Structure formats: C-alpha cells, structure tokens
Amino acid sequence: MAYIISTPFPLRFPDSILNFQVSSAFVEKKKKGSSPMSKRRGLSLEEKREKILQIFYESQDFFLLKELEKLGPKKGVITQSVKDVVQSLVDDDLVSKDKIGTSVYFWSLPSCAGNQLRNVQRKLESDLENSKKKFVELVDKRNELKKGREESDERETALAELKAIELKHNELKEEMVQYADNDPAAFEALKKAIEVAHGAANRWTDNIFTLRQWCSNNFPEAKEQLEHMYKEIGITDDFDYVEFSPAAIQICAVGDEEGNP
C-alpha cells in the first residue's frame, strides 16, 4: 500500500518511510515533553525524618503540629505525612513533646540527639559485652560436657545399647496402648464415674417424684392434664429409680477379658 500526497505532481511513498517519519516525530515529541519532575521520586521515611529534624535543628525552637505541617512541604515533606513522621521521631526519643495548657509542643536540639545516640551506643556496648561473656560461658560448658564423651569403642557400644533400649521402650509403650481399656486404674475411674452418675440419676428421679406429688396436692382438679404432660415428656408408669450393682460391673469386665459376650 502507498500514500499519495497532493502536490503539483503526484508523489508515492512506501509505508516504511512514512512509519519511520511518524515514529521519529513521536520520539522527538516525547523527548521534548519529558521533564526532570516526571523522574523525581518521593522521599523515603528516613529522608523525611532527616528533613523534619533539620527544621528543629536550624531553628532550635518549639513548634505546634500545625506549624510543622506548614513547614514540612518547604523541606519536601507533604503535609499529610508530617504527623506520622513527627510521631516516629518522638517514639525514637529524637523529638520531645509536652502538653502546655491545651496545646502540645514539639522540640529537638542537636545536643538532645547527641545524648540519645550516646545512650544507644552505651547500650549496644553493654549488650556486646554481655554477649561476649555468655559466649565464653557456653564454650566452657561445652568443653566440660565433652569430658568423658570422647570417641571410643566403649562409648560406641554404650550408645548402641541405649538406642536398642529406647526402641524396646517405644515398642512396649505402643503395646500398652492396646491394653488401655483393661487398665486397672482406668477401670476404677470408670467405676467411680458410674457411681456418681447413678447417684445423680436417682437424685433427679427423687426430685421428679417430689414434684409430681406437689402438683397432685396443689392441683387435684388438673390430674388428667398433668398425667398427659408427664407422658409427653417421657415420665411413664414404669418410670422408677435406677438399680446399680458394683458386682455387675466386675462380672462384665471379667467377661470382656475372656472374650465372652
């Protein structure tokens, strides 16, 4: 395909030339349109902290937060982030604040920052010294533990015996799990639990009989309605105390051990 440009005489250009010219013009336009501001990146948090500290160090004055929010943009820190930056400086003890009346003032002097850094240095030096002492103690303890544990045929034999004993111990523990249901201690605990449950069941049975008697004495005219209600909730004519025999539990346990139903 070719393009025809209106001239006194017809001209025909191939597509490649026109595409090259358009592309070149587009590149030149992009170059002219680009500006250093488009490549400018935002400040990092640490850079913002340094800029805010400069405000304090250069003036050595006291500021309200709203004053700092006005001065921040002059240092390249946007107003919306000034509050968070100042708070981070306060948290690190690089900026002090105090409430006077209803206003909160912020300040920081170069000497305060120096004192803070010296305190941090002393703490780090103390931590380093303690770590060195602990390292020496651990090395001494390791050397003490090494005594009597030197590699030898006797030690190898003892370790092999220990491993075999541990394996046998684990096997016995797994075997004991199979007999957990027949554990005498578990059986005694179950028997006591049954006794407690039996006592509780009969105590509630006795409470139900007492309540039925009270209803009969106080509402004799509603006898039929009461009987109907008792049947609806499961209190039938055969409702009675639960019989319990410890000997029956013992017989059942023995039957289970022998494989009897």
Image (spheres, rainbow, N blue to C red):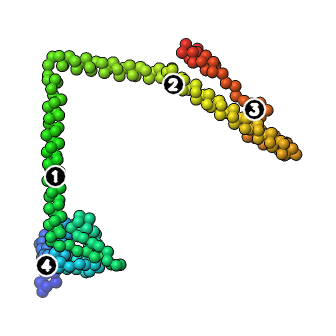
Q: Amino acid at mark 4?
A: Lys
Q: State which mark lies toward you, 1 or 2.
A: 1
Numbered badge on residue 239: 3
Q: Position of residue 81 (x, y in %)?
A: 27, 72
Residue 42 placement: quadrant: bottom left
Q: Amino acid at mark 1?
A: Ser
Numbered badge on residue 32: 4
Q: Amino acid at mark 3?
A: Phe
Quadrant occupied by the C terminus: top right
Q: Residues within 10 Å of mark 3 (few under 14, many from 20)?
A: few
Q: Residues within 10 Å of mark 2 (few under 14, many from 20)?
A: few
| Upstream in sequence: badge 1 or badge 2 | 1
- The residue at 73%/35% (across/down) is 206
61 or 26, which lies in front? 61
Location of mark 1 (residue): 126
Dot 1 falls on a residue whose secondary structure is helix
| Upstream in sequence: badge 4 or badge 2 | 4
- The residue at 65%/30% (across/down) is 198
Dot 4 falls on a residue whose secondary structure is helix
Distance of label 4 from label 1 (alpha carbons): 59 Å
Distance of label 1 from label 2 (alpha carbons): 57 Å
